[in-house]
Image: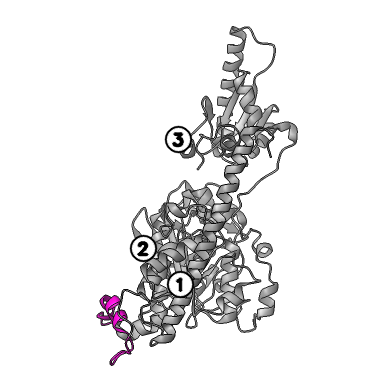
Amino acid sequence: MADRSFASCGGLELLCDSVKIHDVNVEQQGEEKKLTMKYLLSWVRTNLIKERPEMFMKGETVRPGVLVLVNDCDWELSGQLETVLEEKDVVVFISTLHGG
Amino acid sequence: MNSNGKGETVAEIRREIAALQKAKSEIDDRISALQARLSTCASEDGANGTNCCSQRLTPPEPPSSGQLSADAIYRYSRQLILPSFGVEAQANLLKSSVLVIGAGGLGSPALLYLAACGVGRVGIVDHDAVELNNLHRQIIHTEAYIGRSKVESAAAACRAINSTAQIVEHKEAFRTSNALEIMREYDIVVDATDNVPSRYMISDCCVVLRKPLISGAALGLEGQLTVYNYNGGPCYRCLFPTPPPTTACQRCSDSGVLGVVPGIIGCLQALEAIKVAGAVGEPLSGRMLLFDALSARIRVVKIRGRSSQCEACGENAALTEEQFRNLDYENFTQSPLSMSPLKLHLLPAEARITTKEYNEINLKGEPHILVDVRPAHHYKIISLPKSLNIPLASLEGRLSEITAAYASEESNMTATGEASRAPSLYIICRRGNDSQRAVEFLHEKGFAFAKDIIGGLESWSQDVDPKFPIY
């Protein structure tokens, strides 16, 4: 078991009943007991997203315009979908804003 | 337009207003031109263009030892005595130029601080006019400027604060056709716009001309800030190679914004521009600041560096001025540069009525049900009498309420003995888009007689009841 929290900013919380922060336990997968971002995304889509999943994902990754942060760090720097999560990691999804 | 006497009077008044406004704008232009000449004369007289051109103050003397005139030393004294800022950073600021694109919610505070702090030349780009519903957040503008150019209004406010700063007015939309020529004249760019295509266009233009870009955005109760294309950091395209779907691009005019939120982000944009221009501190490059006003949380996160694959600034990309001029950003992002509200056309003419027609139906007392499909918090602001609020998002689960209202209206008619015809069902919203979506849905669900009121409450206010508030 691993504890993870999620904050979604920039309106993405509207897809999960306006709840911004989720503390969740996600089972680790496979023989090596690794939990990757790829699995986590599909878990979030199934378990947290309540409406319009296309506003969160496109294909197997997040839709364009969503930044993913693992422990306050762009997931591009940790391997995107292949990022392996540890216990107590914090994952944040941010929809970019364009207003002014 | 009108042949009756009343119409002529109105037309005459309108003509006179137009003539006076034209004269007023000519005088304003003349004042702007003179002010520009004055600051040019002053900077030619003095050292580094930093002296004050206000006639009240003593004429500039060559500074005795440092780089600043006596007036500049006094004006900027509180930041000069900061050990981590000091006279070098101030001299850098005075020599620098900043272009602010957008004189709205972000641009307002950014411009005020940039002009006040002593940036030598500040350019303002905008093509909009000031409106009453801007004033809660676009704090550079005042009621006196409603209906006039935002650039003129912002420039006047900046000049009033600091007559020694050169304020340049660009009263035009920022487009690929004029972007390079405008931006070329500045050292630093502040993106204070409100739409996706402008953000890509401004970032690309900064890449082509090698300018640092201070990018801010705000919506609702959240804001974001970062510095692009600076010191090896990423550009906007490195972070967002593919534009978001148009459905993910909310606008302040649709989703709302608390005035102080863009205010805070705009202030932070001014701060980052000052750091870059003054060459002090660590500008927010390779990092992004996320501001959540409701929970009072600010987090700064690390973002990716420059992408070698980036189509604008990557290793194999050599975006040229020529290529930039030919890019079509509206097509690339599938969304318009201008902020005209969306106008859907989903329904055949027979499934729609105008607000004037609805008004007559209502005045004649014809039996009907009016369903308002706006969100509940919109409905609370203002609504038409006897309308039933069922927000579009919950329509599917609340069809029984329409059926019930319908049955009740029918029984009323039977009671009053006018059961000759069935009651009608009209759907209204704010601007007439959601009402069409609702009618489409209702038709699918068997309410074939549902009709949309064209243009929604905005049209009601325009065409039927001018006292009905619009928002």
Q: Chain of mark 2?
A: B
Q: Can the viewer see residue B247 in this picture? A: yes
The mark nearer the N terminus, 3 or 1, is 1
Residue at mark 3 to residue at mark 1: CA–CA distance:
48 Å
Which residue lies under the disc numbered 2?
Answer: B298
As drawn, is B362 to the left or to the right of A83? Answer: right
- State the SS at label 1: helix
Q: Amino acid at mark 1?
A: Gln
Label for residue B405?
Answer: none
Residue at mark 2 to residue at mark 3: CA–CA distance:
31 Å
Label for residue B380?
Answer: 3
- State the SS at label 3: loop
Q: Is residue B66 magenta?
A: yes
Q: Residues within 10 Å of mark 3 (few under 14, many from 20)?
A: few
Measured from the top left, where is residue B28 in percent x and y?
A: 50, 63
Measured from the top left, where is residue B236 in percent x and y?
A: 55, 71
Which residue lies under the disc numbered 1?
Answer: B35
The mark nearer the N terminus, 2 or 1, is 1
- State the SS at label 2: strand
Of the pair B130 and B459, the residue shown nearer to us: B130
The residue under the point 61% across, 52% down is B340
Which part of the image, by quadrant, shows the N terminus of chain B? top right
Measured from the top left, where is residue A46 in percent x and y?
A: 54, 51
Q: Tell me: residue A13, above or below residue B357.
A: below
Residue bounds of the magenta highlight: B61-84
Q: Chain of mark 3?
A: B
Q: Amino acid at mark 2?
A: Ile
